[in-house]
Each structure stands twice: as structure tokens, then as C-alpha cells.
Amino acid sequence: MVREISCAAAALDLRARLPHPARWRASHLPFPPMILALETSTRRASLAVYDRESDRVVDGASFTTDRAHNAAIFAPLERLVAAHREQLEGIVVGLGPGSYGGVRVGLAVANGLSVAMGLPVIGGNSLEAWETAGDSCLVVGDARRGSCFVAVVRERKLQGEPELVDDADLGAFLAPLLDGGLAVHTCDAKVVEAVAGAIVSYPEAGRLAALYRAVDLNGLAPTALEPVYLRAPYITMPKAK
């Protein structure tokens, strides 16, 4: 919780450190509307400024940390906001599933920027933004507690909910899916070791933004953004003394 509060406060502080006021509406300016996207659900996080008109990423940054997204995100974020603030129309943030701390850092920053800059913010499923050669794949990741999750993505759309599979059963579970021609993408070493031919890749902020190319962000009703969890949080009770 302390990390989330500090991230939100730092995002709000960006407004004070920018050379010009950052409260505006892109629809009132003669610039192509762009989206700022944040994807922080894995150890490799990425930021992107996506031009909806040309359907391309015009600027971006990425960084890799194990447990320090909150420390690494603000330098590249400040550069992107300073360079493109007058063109931004909204913010898109990855909701996971993925790193508990990483996802919550992204949410805190996105919400803070939304308040500071007067921009709408929307959340998207990180599995649909995975970096792949095509638009369909299997995303397999370490779900901890001796299990993996398996998600089927077709044409950039998640097909149902990710399945939780015990590590010992992963090969048998994947066999019919692999026969269907889908490649396995993962960012976890455990999966690379267990699945022959697994491709190491990550969700990308630019791909996340592209999912909302045709969405009127200013027309969205405000909603509370919540992380996507694969299972209920694991809580241990203190032992009786």
C-alpha cells in the first residue's frame, strides 16, 4: 500500500515539474489524438505513446527490474509526458495477470496521471497485448504454488479465463493445443525449461494501446480499475503463541 501511495503521489507531482500546464483536452487541439499506455505486469515493463490515426507507436521506453518498477518508471514516463502531453487523449494501463506489485504500480501511476492531467483512463488485459509474430498464441506463465496458467489468445482476444494447471500436468494439458498450431509464449524460466520450443516474450504497451484504437476514451464512464488475479490472494494466519 505504501508503494501504491508513493507512486500515485509521484505521478501527481509530474504536473508541477512540467514546463507548461498539463490540464487540457486533446480534442480541442490541432494534433492527432494519442494514447499513453503503461504495461507493468512482468519484469520487463514498457511505456508507449500510440498514434491512433496512423496506428503506430511514435515513442516509448522499456525497462527491466525484478521488484523495483516503482523506482524505474518515472524517468521514462516524465520524458514521454513532457514530449507528448498536448497530444494525449487518454491513458491505457495493463491490468495483468502478472506480478502483483508490478500491476499495482502501473495502476497507481495511471490513476495519478489521470487526476493530474484530466485524462480518461481505461484498463486492459495484459494477455491480449503479448508480443507475438501473429495475433494468436498460448501464453503460459508461472502461477506459483506448483502450478502454471495457460491462456489461449486468438486474434488478440482472450478465449475464456486462463486455466490453472499443476506443473506435473502441464505437458499433457498443452499437447492438444500445440497440435492446433498455437505457439507457446512465456516470460518465465520455469516454462522455458518445461515446454520445448517455448518463445520468450512479454506484453507490450504499444500492443495494449492498439486494442483501443477505435474506442472513444472520452465517452467512457469512470470505473474503478482492479488488477486481474488468477486466484484469490494467499493469506497466512499468524500462529497461535
Image: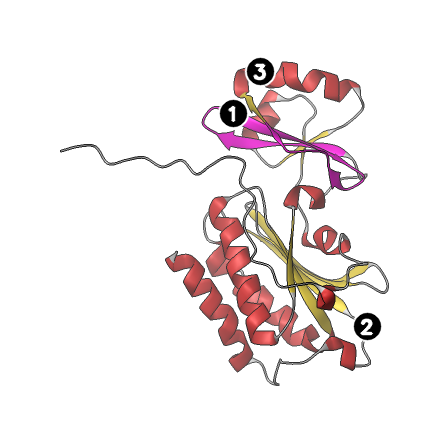
Q: Nearer the viewer, residue 232 or 47?
A: 232
Q: The C terminus appears in which quarter of the rendering?
A: top left
- For this orientation, the residue located farthest to the front is 221
Question: Which tag, 2 or 1, sits closer to the chain's start?
Answer: 2
Image position, residue 124 (x, y; %): 66, 51
- For this orientation, the residue located farthest to the bottom is 20
What's the amino acid at mark 3? Asp
The image quadrant that residue 89 belongs to is bottom right
What is the count of numbered marks? 3
Give the residue at mark 1. Answer: 147
Q: The N terminus appears in which quarter of the rendering?
A: bottom left
Give the residue at mark 3. Answer: 169
Residue occupying image coordinates x 53% and y 20% = 166
Give the residue at mark 2. Answer: 32
What's the amino acid at mark 2? Pro
- Along the horizontal axis of the image, is 42 left or right of 175? left
Q: Which type of secondary structure does the marked residue at label 2 adopt?
A: loop
Residue occupying image coordinates x 61% and y 84% = 21
Work out whether 72 lies above or below 78.
above
CA separation, marks 3 and 1? 9 Å
How crowded is the residue under tag 3: few (<14 C-alpha within 10 Å), some, or many (20+)? few
Q: Is residue 170 magenta?
A: no
What's the amino acid at mark 1? Ser
The image quadrant that residue 225 belongs to is bottom right
Question: Which tag, 3 or 1, sits closer to the chain's start?
Answer: 1
Q: Which type of secondary structure does the marked residue at label 1 adopt?
A: strand
State which region is magenta: 137-163
Image position, residue 150 (x, y; %): 63, 29
Residue occupying image coordinates x 64% and y 71% = 119
Residue occupying image coordinates x 74% and y 76% = 26
Image position, residue 14 (x, y; %): 53, 75
